[in-house]
Image (cartoon, grey):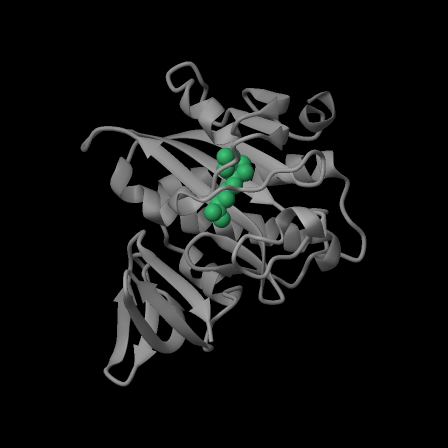
Amino acid sequence: CDKILSQVKCPQLELIPIIDSTNQYLLDRFGLLPKGAVCLAEYQQAGRGRRGRQWLSPFGSNLYLSMYWRLDAGMAAAMGLSLVVGVAIAETLQSLGADEVRVKWPNDLYYRDKKLAGILVEMTGQAGDAAHLVIGMGLNINMPDTEGSDIGQAWTNLSQACDKLPERNHLAAELIDSLQKTLITYEQVGLDGFVERWNRIDNFLNRPVKLLIGQRVIEGIARGIDKQGALLLETESGIEPYIGGEISLRGC
Ligand code: BTN
């Protein structure tokens, strides 16, 4: 912790060697946490991804990081928030030498068409009240082949994306700093300014993709995101926005 805290201001930082899930740890402590509190782990016994999937979290190979945030604008603002978190992480990794890192709508980080990191935002709150969010990020740094081979899609490691891998404490400090700054900016201006930044680093911009919506599959060309954070898909009938947690994007 000290090594990280010497590089970044963080109101509360806990580094827990073995945990069920860093997201769960913070979710269980809402109300006790200062905004911006962070939990990091070396190993997660029950790391989780989106849609109830498991997030494989072997010891020492990767980064498992969660941050607590209170969003006064309420739950409705949270969709945009997970997009800006993706932009913040991708730009930070680029600044540390992984210049080909890209975002994939809505919550993934990609390197050369393979998944490098995933973001899971979990929240609670009443309509009309502030939303309490936990923003969780799992970043593959040196995931062994044997551990992560079964996630149902191609994946990769930061060690592949950088010539010189940043030191892990420095990486954590930079990510925490960038998340804090980005979330503060998002509270002030919403998605304004982020749409352009997203579209600059969108892995599938102007490429053929498939959207899986329940049993439906729609093919088209990805045209980035709009001001609401919806994915824009061009088909024969024109460009339409798609938004919502039940939509998956795949390259063709
Ligand atoms: C996904 O791509 O499905 C999202 C994966 C999110 C994994 C991270 S690891 C840190 C935090 N704790 C968890 O249990 N999940 C998130």
Residue 204 location (% of width, % of height): 48, 70
**Is 44 placed above or below 82 here?**
above
Query: Please, which residue is most extreme toward the top here?
Result: 32
- Closest to the observer: 213 or 135? 213
Horizontal and vertical percent position of residue 221: 39, 78
Residue lying furthest left in this view? 128
Q: Residue at x 65, y 63 (%)?
A: 100
Q: Nearer the viewer, residue 113 or 169?
A: 113
Residue 11 in picture, x, y percent from top left: 54, 21
Q: Is residue 190 visible?
A: no
* For residue 207, above or below residue 188: below
Q: How many marks?
A: 0
Look at 64% across and 38% down and name the residue there.
Answer: 63
Picture layout, residue 171 above or below residue 162: above
Of residue 39 and residue 24, the one placed in the foreground of this image is: 24
Locate residue 32: give its quadrant: top left
Residue placed furthest toward the bottom:
236
Specify whether 111 is left or right of 213: right
Residue 156 drawn at (x, y percent): 65, 57
What residue sits 45% from the left and 44% below the top?
Answer: 53
Q: Quadrant of the N terminus?
A: top right
Query: Can the viewer see residue 54 in this picture?
Result: yes
Residue at 49 percent across and 42 percent down: it is 54
In the image, 34: left or right of 3? left
